[in-house]
Amino acid sequence: MIFTPGLQARFWLIALALLIAALWILKPILLPFMAGMAIAYFLNPVVDKLTSRNIPRWLGAMMVLAGFTLVIVLIVLLIGPMLESQIGALINALPDYVEKARDHLIPWIENRLANFTPEDAQKIRDAAGNAAGNAAGIAGKALQNIITDSLALIDIMALAIITPVVAFYLMRDWPSVVEAIDSFIPRRHYVVVKEQLAEIDTSLSGFVRGQALVCLALGLVYSLGLTIVGLQYGAAIGVVAGVLSFIPYVGTGFCWIASIILALVQFDNMGRIGMVIGVLLLGHVLEAYVLTPRLVGKRVGLHPVWILFALIAGVRLMGFVGVLIAVPTAAVIGVLTRFAVGRYKKSSLYKDPLAPHKQ
């Protein structure tokens, strides 16, 4: 049977729809497998280097995975107690902070309300009460969703066992997996497909590995800087901000909001608050003009807004699994979109057939 271009397009669209449907149906059990794939993709270049030095691939995969696990355990052992103590102390101090903030805010609000008529002031109070009720309802629903998701992932031991097993076998069999995928590429479009796969790999690897280094650097800068200027719980804020920095704008936004709120509550002079803002500005300048351009670079081809949209859509559609596949999906769509736009601009749909041709 000879497939016309129309039949080929229909075949691949049906295959894509079936793949999306399978991912949607299997999403409750995909987390350890997606996590293992992400770890294998991240660590595979190290395994390749060990293999090039005549180390058996299975041994190289085991060594790399053991080293990665050791690093994670050491980080947890070193940072975990500090985070636990600071977050616990912050939770215990929250009532005092709320009371102090209320003592400052209530007189300010009452002074502002004194400028309104009693009817307008009552309307403002009613609107504020309704907004607070809505916010409480949203927070309660979010907490319920968190609890539900946590119960769905309560079997953490299974996750801890399956993920490294998947990562090990993928790293060990990576050449075979690549060869199998290569064998399924239609021969008629082999060169074009391979070029686009290479673009996807460059875009994805550049973002994932570069952004991981950005997160590490920002976590260190914010933690050390906020601690040096005397902000309580600054180390915990810096670590959390560094982790959240994998999502563009989110980590920086969290660090600014949390640090400034705590600085306003803890410090009575503008000099100390200015020092906190100075640390935040330093982190922002380093991220925007040094870390991201050097470690991620323009070759990634993924705009931060596009990445942010992809991550939010992934969380909304598939939860934490969506977070793991959001950036790869964004990279694939970005590369294919640029390819499609390039083909479109070379086609008669874009060019004016009546325009004179350049010699």
Image: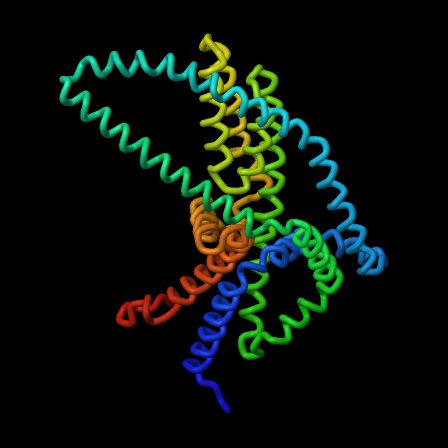
Q: Nearer the viewer, residue 342 or 146?
A: 146
State the residue in front, 148 or 106.
148
Q: From the viewer's side, name the closer residue of 343 and 268.
A: 268
On the picture, is 52 further left or further right than 161? right
Image x and y of residue 250, in percent:
48, 37
Residue 113, image x and y in percent? 22, 16
Image check: 278 left or right of 214?
A: left
Q: Residue furthest top?
A: 269
Q: In this view, does 293 lie above or below 326?
A: above
Colour scheme in the image? rainbow
Rendered residue at 55%/30% (across/down): 286
In-front residue for pair 164/26: 26
Within the image, what quadrant is residue 9 found in? bottom left
Quick one: quadrant of the C terminus? bottom left
Residue at figure coordinates x 78%, y 48% from the top left: 66
Question: Quadrant of residue 130 in the image?
Answer: top left
Residue 11, placed above or below residue 118: below
Apparent side of residue 161 relative to residue 357 in the rendered image (left or right): right
Total tally of numbered discs in the picture? 0
x, y (%) of residue 213?
62, 39
- 104 vs 355: above or below: above
Residue 16 position, x and y percent, is: 48, 70
